[in-house]
């Protein structure tokens, strides 16, 4: 009886080609979870692994009824895998972490403490990019700088997917329907009371990181597109600048031709200015179309207009 009244913690773990890490991960995490005063479940999402990850996962879930496995038919990517885990978890809170042991399992109790004290989202922030290449470091720096410049919500640098969500956040997250998604940015978009925990990522012991450079670039572009309309409006801004400058030049040429008659612009210069002017107008038209597309985009992503924490009396 006592057992059933305990709150439940769900642990969500996306797995892609982690056959060597899965047993280690389970070994470690079950010790940490058992030491907590919570009932728990682990939801592994096998994201179309090409190795024997699924066999390892099935072995574990056969012996431990608290472990569930969602087995994707193919690789859908980590963002979708985590989403599936959040959709299906039953806990009063869920903890998301990587299967590759890069997220320090032993720090889960600290996340729980913050949650118990009232935080609704507890975000793990990487202290340093240990063991990361120069390109990735610079890339992520530029990405965060840019997205914070052009989108209207703040995304904390080096905030990771290593995070805890309260049930209210999980429920709101489950209402989001957009398909092209970056899970952590969506969670940030939802708001709620948040706390941060600094951690140092361990180095990967087995296997290779699945996110190649280009996959990361794609993810970065996708999230810029879904959280900011700036790229859409860019053509329009360019158009305004070009039209204005070439218009100015055009006036200057006309004035010279018919009034001052000093510089005698050649025909090709005049042609170039006319063409520039027209290009500017075309770009402005593109920008106008972009505004309509932006509206369509907002309707199609179909995000809720607002998020409510709790409403009193119904
Ligand atoms: N992952 C996944 N699907 C993918 C790629 C990765 O579920 O298509 C999982 C992977 O098994 C790991 C986590 O997502 O648990 C983070 O992946 P990875 O270590 O490759 O990324 P990084 O540590 O570079 O962020
Ligand atoms: Mg990793």
Image: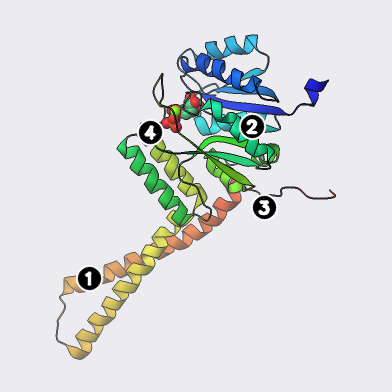
Q: Which mark is residue 79?
A: none
Residue lying at the far right of the rendered structure: 313
> In the depicted view, which residue is nearer to us: 223 or 190?
190
Q: Position of residue 74 (x, y in %)?
A: 51, 22
Residue at 57%, 45% (x, y): give it. 188
Earlier in the chain: of badge 1 and badge 3, it is: 1
Q: Where is residue 101 in the image (x, y as percent from the top left)?
A: 48, 24
Q: Is mark 1 on a helix, strand or loop?
A: helix
Residue at 68%, 41% (x, y): give it. 117
Residue at 40%, 20% (x, y): give it. 207
Q: Which of marks 2 and 1 is in front?
A: 2
Earlier in the chain: of badge 2 and badge 1, it is: 2
Q: Position of residue 228 (x, y in %)?
A: 49, 53
Q: Residue 306 carries which label?
A: 3
- Distance between the alpha carbons at the discs numbered 2 and 4: 26 Å
**Is disc 1 surrounded by few (<14), some (14 to 19) or many (20+) residues within 10 Å?**
few
Q: Nearer the viewer, mark 2 or mark 4?
A: 4
Q: Residue 94 carries which label?
A: 2
Label 4 sits on residue: 130
Q: Nearer the viewer, mark 2 or mark 3?
A: 2
Q: Nearer the viewer, mark 4 or mark 1?
A: 4
Q: Do the residues labelled 2 and 1 touch (CB within 8 Å)?
A: no
- Distance between the alpha carbons at the discs numbered 2 and 1: 64 Å
Earlier in the chain: of badge 4 and badge 3, it is: 4
Label 1 sits on residue: 271
Q: Can residue 84 be seen in this view?
A: no
Q: In this view, does 119 lie above or below 267?
A: above
Q: Is residue 45 above or below residue 192?
A: above
Q: Is residue 267 visible?
A: yes
């Amino acid at each position: 009886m006592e057992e059933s009244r305990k709150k439940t913690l769900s642990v969500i773990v996306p797995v892609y080609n982690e056959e060597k890490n899965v047993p280690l991960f389970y070994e470690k995490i079950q010790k940490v979870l058992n030491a907590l005063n919570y009932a728990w479940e682990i939801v592994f999402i096998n994201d179309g692994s090409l190795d024997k990850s699924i066999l390892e996962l099935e072995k574990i879930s056969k012996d431990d009824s608290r472990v569930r496995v969602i087995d994707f038919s193919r690789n859908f990517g980590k963002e979708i895998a985590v989403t599936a885990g959040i959709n299906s978890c039953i806990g009063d809170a869920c903890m998301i972490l990587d299967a590759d042991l890069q997220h320090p399992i032993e720090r889960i109790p600290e996340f729980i403490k913050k949650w118990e004290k009232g935080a609704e989202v507890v975000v793990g922030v990487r202290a340093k990019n240990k063991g990361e290449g120069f390109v990735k470091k610079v890339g992520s720096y530029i990405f965060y700088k840019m997205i914070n410049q052009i989108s209207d919500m703040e995304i904390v640098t080096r905030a990771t997917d290593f995070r805890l969500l309260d049930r209210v956040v999980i429920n709101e997250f489950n209402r989001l329907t957009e398909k092209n998604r970056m899970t952590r940015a969506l969670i940030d978009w939802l708001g709620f009371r948040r706390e941060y925990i600094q951690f140092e990522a361990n180095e990967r012991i087995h296997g290779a990181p699945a996110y190649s450079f280009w996959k990361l670039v794609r993810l970065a572009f996708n999230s810029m597109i879904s959280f900011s309309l700036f790229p859409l409006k860019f053509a329009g801004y360019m158009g305004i600048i070009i039209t204005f400058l070439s218009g100015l030049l055009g006036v200057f040429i006309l004035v010279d031709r018919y009034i001052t008659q000093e510089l005698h612009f050649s025909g090709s210069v005049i042609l170039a200015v006319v063409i520039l002017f027209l290009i500017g107008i075309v770009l402005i038209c593109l920008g106008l179309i972009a505004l309509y597309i932006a509206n369509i985009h907002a309707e199609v992503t179909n995000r809720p207009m607002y998020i409510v924490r709790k409403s009193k009396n119904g």
